[in-house]
Image: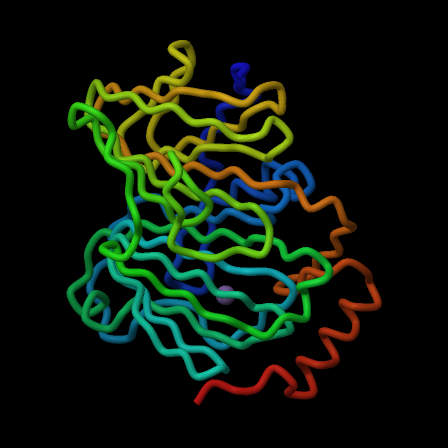
Amino acid sequence: MTRKSTEAIISPPLHHFVGDGFRVHNFIPGIVPMHRMSPFLMLDYNSKYYFPPSVNPRGVDDHPHKGFETVTIAYKGRISHHDSTGNSDVIEEGGVQWMTAGSGILHKEYHEKEYSAKGGDFQMVQLWVNLPSRFKETSPKYQGFASSEIPFYELENNQGIIEIISGEYEGLQGAATTFSPTHLLNAKIVSGGKASFSFPSSYSTALLIIEGNALINNEEFARTDHFVLFKNDGTDFEIEAKEDAIVLILSGEPILEPIVAHGPFVMNTSAQIEQAILDYKNGKFGSIT
Ligand code: MN
């Protein structure tokens, strides 16, 4: 057991809009390259933002994905989802959607109608998790979890909880199944509380401070909305909350394969990208009814 040290504490870059409903700071690949964070290809973070009421829900209309998975975590507000395999769902506050685009899917992502009509704070994360080449043509799959369906570990002495979205923590298995080892945890730690984590040193590991702050390894301090990238020099780290905190923890085994990314498609070769574009144009990703 060796200590994992921090490589960088990154402040949120200037936001941009995805459609008209997602006001995001792009940490991966805008600041941290895809290869550096493999299997995490993309991380868009909508820091807490008040959207005024709107009769027409804001969001992103029909668009395709292929070759990876999208993971959406709703911290504030609610998100509606419809896709070409017939799934129609709402990600409630505290909920997670794990969508495997695999061989190809169309979907649309919107503010949920009632939330949109009332307006309110919106805060979410969307991650893209790569698929190993042998699973890029897997059938699209949908896993949706309400907050109450996500297993959690209770820290001693009421210091908080660790929600296990995927992977494991202290022997507890996460809610979502994954195609390669991917740990996604929400640490909800009360002021003064501490939690320890251990992942193989080869894994790509980072934190996103959703709420409050975190003192890492008793030496580095990260504030709300900051992204903490760890070096691959050790296995263990500790987080201490100096005020009530929510920290998203990402750690995954790198997929050591070529990445060819083109917009919403992420494959291994340019020929596969050309084929994906052709398949999409020819309607092979289906339609949203
Ligand atoms: Mn999408």
Residue 227 at what x, y percent from top left? 46, 32
Q: Residue furthest front?
A: 171
62 lies left or right of 124: right
Q: Residue furthest top?
A: 219
Instruction: Name the one closer to the observer, 270 or 164.
Output: 164
Residue found at x 53% / y 19%: 4
212 lies left or right of 86: left
Instruction: Name the one closer to the observer, 10 or 197.
Output: 197
Residue 56 at what x, y percent from top left? 28, 75
Image vertical order of residue 89 relative to residue 164, above or below: below
Image vertical order of residue 229 relative to residue 2, above or below: below
67 lies left or right of 217: right
Residue found at x 44% / y 49%: 166
Residue 34 at what x, y percent from top left? 65, 44
Quarter occupied by the C terminus: bottom left
Q: Tell how many labels.
A: 0
**Quadrant housing residue 215:** top left
Instruction: Name the one closer to the observer, 171 or 187.
Output: 171
Residue found at x 41% / y 65%: 143
Residue 282 at what x, y percent from top left? 69, 87
**Quadrant housing residue 139:** bottom right
Residue found at x 75% / y 56%: 260
Image vertical order of residue 48 relative to residue 130, above or below: above
Protein image colouring: rainbow
